Amino acid sequence: MIYRRFFNIPTWRFRSPWDELHRMRQQLEQMFDDTPGQRASAGVFPLINLTEDRNNYYVRAELPGVKAEELDIQATANNIAISGERKIAAEGENARYHRREREAGSFSRMIGLPGDINTDKVDAKLENGVLTVVIAKAEAAKPKQITIKS
Amino acid sequence: MADTQSKELKVREKQELASPAEQTTPGLVFTPAVDIFETEKQITLLADMPGVKSDDLTIDLRDNTLTLSANIAPVENADEEDILVEYETGRYYRQFTLGELINQENIDAKLNDGVLRLSLPKVEKATPKRITVKAG
């Protein structure tokens, strides 16, 4: 009995000071993983939101200051490729900047859709800097109502 | 400018407002990314506010404090279901303190493709005068 107690004391094991730090780091990482604000992002510009209803997929992206003619959207069997360039015009020689947070540059992103699509029925519109691509699902990918016979 | 335009754009998460006061209406509030530059005649502010219509944007200038706030209308139809959510939408809010006197009557605001361009002309008195240093 005494023997068992002796070996069950949790601090029996030799601990290095790094063990404690390692444990703290793991706990912190876990905390951040659980944060509801944290989203699974592909890390590719632009960030997109993908939704669906019975007939369509909807891909949305915020692209302020991007003109429709500077965007290129292509559809394949179940992929949508969005590429383009965001330009910020130069403001002249004597403009002195206080803040410069907006960025210009090119971008290219491929989005895999969960089902097959009808590539002939893809609509895109750019409104107030928000791109919406409406993609019709292929007939085979649409949900079918199944009636139960009695 | 050619240099900055050819680089690849990196993902930047929208900045949520770290508000000193609590919000009375529910929903997220973001701070728009801005460029501010000044010339001798005016201060110009450019702000990225995707999804904002001109009717929903309020610009307020009083006592040197410029306030931008905007509401956005939801873009999704009611029967859509989320598959992937990488960004959130919400209101925009940001305040600036202006160091210069602004000619309030000639403020000009344009909203194009989700980018606000606000021109704030300086009051004549604040236009800097070049001081020539005489050798002697």
Image (tube, rainbow, N blue to C red):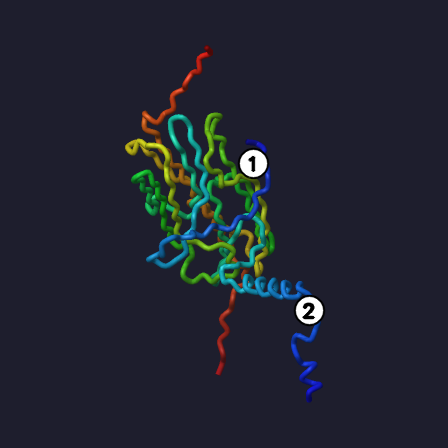
For image coordinates 33% across by 57% down, the residue present is B24
For image coordinates 49% across by 45% down, the residue present is A63
Q: Is residue B69 left or right of residue A7?
A: left
For image coordinates 38% across by 44% down, the residue present is B95
Is A36 in front, or is B48? A36
Quick one: label 1, few (<14), some, or many (20+) residues within 10 Å? some
Secondary structure at badge 2 equals: loop
Please state which of the two labelled residues, at mark 2 or mark 1, is closer to the viewer. 2
Q: Is residue A82 left or right of residue A95?
A: right
> Which kind of residue does numbered mark 2 sit on?
Arg
Q: Disc 1 sits on a residue from what chain? A: B
Q: Disc 2 sits on a residue from what chain? A: A
Indicate the quadrant where residue A83 lies: top right
Is B104 in front, or is B81? B104
Residue A15: mark in rendering:
2
Whole-angstrom CA distance, mark 2 to mark 1, is 54 Å
Picture coordinates of residue A73, whole percent (x, y): 55, 46
Compared with residue A92, is residue A80 higher up or lower down, i.e. above or below? below
Compared with residue B124, is residue A104 higher up or lower down, i.e. above or below? below
Picture coordinates of residue B129, whole percent (x, y): 38, 21
Secondary structure at badge 1 equals: helix
Picture coordinates of residue A89, whole percent (x, y): 49, 33
For image coordinates 40% across by 53% down, the residue present is B19
> Which kind of residue does numbered mark 1 sit on?
Gln
The residue at which mark 1 appears reads as: B5
Quick one: label 2, few (<14), some, or many (20+) residues within 10 Å? few
Which image quadrant: the N terminus of chain A? Answer: bottom right
Say yes or no: labels 2 and 1 on the same chain.
Answer: no
Picture coordinates of residue A124, whole percent (x, y): 49, 48
